[in-house]
Amino acid sequence: MYKIKKIIIITIALVVAVLTFLPFLWMISASFMATGEANKFPPSLFPNKIDFSHYQILFSRLNLTRYLINSIIISLGATFFSLSLNSMGGYAFAKFRFQNKNKLFKFLLSSMIIPGQVTMLPVFLLLKNLGLINTYWAIIVPGMASIFGIFLIRQYALSIPDSLIEAAKMDGATEFQIYYKIILPLCKPILVTLGLFTFMGTWNDFLWPLIVMTDANMYTLPVALANLSSEHVQDTELLMAGSLITILPVLIVFLALQKYYIKGIMLGSVKE
Amino acid sequence: MVIKEKMNSKTKLSSILFFLSPALTVIVIFFFLPVIVAFIMSFTDFDIYALGNFSYLRFIGLKNYSTILRDELFWTALRNTFYFVIVGGPLSVAASLAAAVLLNSKFIKFKGIFRLIYFLPVVTTHVAVSIVWRYIYHPRFGLMNYILGFVGIGPIDWLGDPNWSMPAIILLVVWKNFGYNMVIFIAGLQNIPEELYEAASIEGASAWQQFKHITIPQLAPTTLFISLITMIGYFQLFAEPYVMTQGGPLNSTLSIVLYMYQEGFRWWNIGYSTALAFMLFLIILIGTTIQFKLQKEKNV
């Protein structure tokens, strides 16, 4: 009985794993198939012969390098600003003493229920008036600070002992020195987490880049891919190659830093 | 004594401004002010003409909202979104819980690897996986129908049949998201004291009884949190229908955000689109309140 139970549970876990991974497996293998090979019945899980031509087409004729660079610059830029601004704000909310601090923080938290879509049109019009549409700033600037980012840093910074800060003050350190030399190094794990969230969130985002990047040269990878998919519906293998390239960078970043990502989810799920 | 005095003292205003104003300025300019402006815009007839010349802009009171209530496409989008949230939400949460319980089992070795594989879809790009799944759902060559063929289920035109298009999107989204909440559930499971299960075992409770009377109640706060974030996120369905079906067939996958996007950024009916956004906000607010109420009643 015990043994049967064990076999059943392991089998279920394995089947779920295979089914979860299957779409990726198919994407990878179809991206290396010759044109038309993926549109056959029964579907084949492995290419007859490895064919790199779709990747070549993507990077030469279809300008994917440009979109890749756009995505990298935008995601890194957003990550840099988000880390700077949110860490300062989060630290202040954790350790500064001023009137109505907690009220202000609670107000910020409760406003998180407003869906971001509400702000899209006014922000678009504002960026348009500033001449920022079709620039990297159109994506980077609105995301430079976020309530979630401040929240994440604050939760972590709360655990830093006040005595450390007081001791530094006694030694004559300025507020900025304390932040830069004590708080930031201590907050490293949560900074990695927030950086990871911001980078991946920006990379994967679709709706906002779709709105503010109307010039084909400024497309991010997801927008370019969505565009490609409506123009090349029949080119299954080409689109699988494009999907793989879009997913791969975030996947690599995630695999390298997954511990921090999981920790971030946990921190984000214990509100108050 | 000196230290204590310092500890209670307020931080200098200049420091507060220096550290808080950058982040708060961005949040005010790109979040709070736009919310207010959007609210005002939802009472105007802001459209493509007003975009060129602001003097065409007129306040029309509640007209956008009354138009929405008579707009058949809005009701279709609302119905579809509710379908997605009410079926897809609980399904997602159940799948996450099942996966968490599975991976928490003492029989499973290499838990880290399983967790990683289950989690992979979470970090991938919506647009990319939507494209991949569009081909998996292909009625003739797709993997889905091929696999279902083994269990005797006939070919389904997943994305072409209005009855199957939303289930197809739900299935994709459950696959993409279950790993996220699974991680939270696993942590919740590990916080349940082992003694509870031991005591129940001694009294002869079956695995199912233990699950029902220990696991579920102990996880209640976690489940509430997960249900809330899942529901709020699912109300904002956009990329999947945009890429896979463009809201079709026969508007069967038109979501509120997709409709809002089309009205606002394709037709530039800006006033109308912002009114739609506030309807979405209102619905999310009502949904959240109901969930809290339900949870409270359960606890009484």
Image (tube, coloured by chain):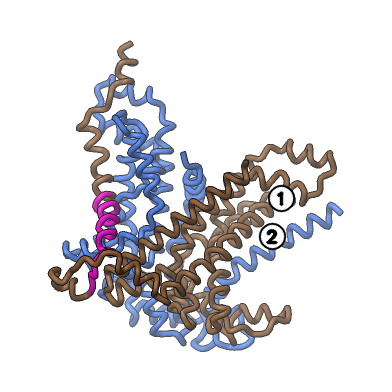
Chain colours: A blue, B brown
**Where A134 sits versus B15, above or below?**
below
- Residue A162's quadrant in the figure? top left
Residue at x 83% of width, y 57% of height: A4
Q: Is residue A244 visible?
A: no
Mark 1 and mark 2 on one chain: no
Residue at x 30% of width, y 63% of height: A120
Residue at x 24% of width, y 70% of height: B45
Secondary structure predominantly adopted by residues drawn in magenta: helix
Q: Depth check: A174 or A69 in front?
A: A174
Q: Depth check: B101 or B118 in front?
A: B101
Left of B239 or right of it: where is A90?
A: left
Q: Depth check: B206 or B82 in front?
A: B82
- Residue B149's quadrant in the figure? bottom right
**Residue bearing the label numbered 2:** A13
**Residue bearing the label numbered 1:** B105
The amino acid on which the numbered mark 2 sits, given as a three-letter code, is Ala
Q: Residues within 10 Å of mark 2 (few under 14, many from 20)?
A: some
Give the x, y percent position of residue B251: 46, 79
Left of A193 or right of it: where is B221?
A: right
Residues rendered magenta in the picture:
B28-47
Circle 1/circle 2 CB separation < 8 Å: yes
